[in-house]
Amino acid sequence: MKKGILSLLLIVFVMISCNKENKKDNVIPNDLAGKKELLKKKKMDLMKLKNEISFLENQIDSLEPGLKKHILVTTIKATKQDFRRYSEIQGVVKSDEITKVSSEIPGRILRVYVDNGNRVKKGQLLVKIDVEGIQNKLEELQKSYDLAKDIYERQERLWKKNIGSEIQFLTAKNNKERLEKGIESLKIQLRKSKIYAPSSGIVDNKQIEEGELASPGFPLMMILNTAKMKVTADVPENYLTSIHKGDKVTVKFPSLNMEATGKIKLIGSTINPTNRTFSIETIFKNHKDQLKPNLLAIVLITDYYLPDAIVVPSELVQYEISGKPFVMIVAKENGLLKARKKYVVTGEEYNGNIVISEGLTENDTLIDKGARSVSANEIIEVSTSK
């Protein structure tokens, strides 16, 4: 009876001691350093507890197979590939060929046969200018020419018969030739009353309407050759040694949700002192006329390149509390597939992928889906479904 009472008192004493110890561990410090230290300790305790649970489950599973339901995972092979990291430079789409259409003679616009957005072919009639004044001048000049020609022919016949003076003959000849040149000049102006497309493309920035006056040299409209487009961008000067004429570049067009590959056609020869950039131009074929002038473009400039590197998805790299990176791989042991923790050294990262510079080989099989749900040495089952 006394032994039973003593045993009961001992159990109560142990429980009270454990309860006091737990309460002490659960006291949250007020200072930041204390909170961080407690959080670190709790995480380590949790990791230790998970490892102990996993160890016990694996022991039980080996003694009584089928009792535990294994975690289903998917896997990927570690492979070597070229790794590129890009810097994104904002650019804009422009037409590679822009032709300004203007009149060579003054006059009132009679007809405009095209409008903005119309596609035209080289030699197509665009504008007709009123040349009634020129036509009237031509008719008057033609009458004067007919008279001058008749006088010249008469003087020529007399001159051949040694009748009349040489001055009279030369004056008549000069008048006839002068009027001939005047007539030819007016005929050229008449031909210029019709303005034709100098190149094929799309009409843009039309600045005249019927009834308005056209002045020589004043642009009436522009024709954009959209068969080939260019993207211009201002690149920071620290890329001077990385970019060369003829290099292939990838360009994204966010509004179209598409990418295209082109070549650098032109590199600017000066540095903009304001923003310390230089310009580049990249030429593209305009497939199905999707590219429009002034469309936003993103030029991808390679700023890091590593050939034949082991590259894995960034999400597969996990970190211990100490910050040490690792991945979960598949290992076969006694006919069972187990998850193994493998420490790695990481390199550059871009677009969801990261370089593994040390720790992995091409023979390693990484756990993909389910990598964060398994513990080291835990028995797993690899899904065979696609």
Image: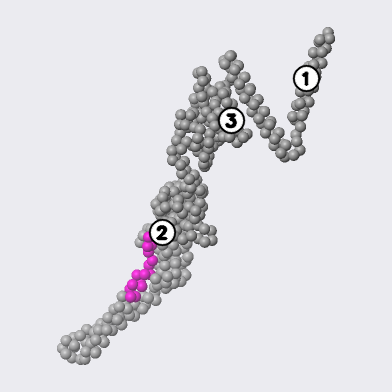
Q: Which residue is at 44% across, 66% downward?
A: 220
Q: How is the image coloured?
A: one colour
What segment carries the magenta color? 185-199
Left or right of 357 on screen, residue 2: right
Q: Is residue 130 visible?
A: no
Q: Look at label 2 and name its amino acid.
A: Glu
Q: Nearer the viewer, mark 1 or mark 3?
A: 1
- The residues bearing labels 1 and 2 have C-alpha atoms spaced at a distance of 90 Å
Q: Secondary structure at mark 2?
A: strand
How many residues crowd around disc 1 within 10 Å: few (fewer than 14), some, or many (20 or more)?
Answer: few
Left or right of 184 on screen, residue 58: right
Q: Which mark is residue 372?
A: 3
Callout 2 touching callout 3 (CB < 8 Å): no
- For the residue pair 131 and 259, the one nearer the viewer reads as 259
- For the residue pair 12 and 197, the one nearer the viewer reads as 12
How many residues crowd around disc 2 within 10 Å: few (fewer than 14), some, or many (20 or more)?
Answer: some
Question: What residue is shown with label 2?
Answer: 97
Left or right of 91 on screen, residue 104: left
- For the residue pair 211 and 165, the one nearer the viewer reads as 165
Q: Secondary structure at mark 3?
A: loop
Q: Is residue 144 visible?
A: yes
**Above or below 99: residue 345:** above
Question: Residue pushed farthest bottom?
Answer: 164
Q: Which mark is residue 14?
A: 1
Q: Look at label 3 and name its amino acid.
A: Arg
How many residues crowd around disc 3 within 10 Å: few (fewer than 14), some, or many (20 or more)?
Answer: some
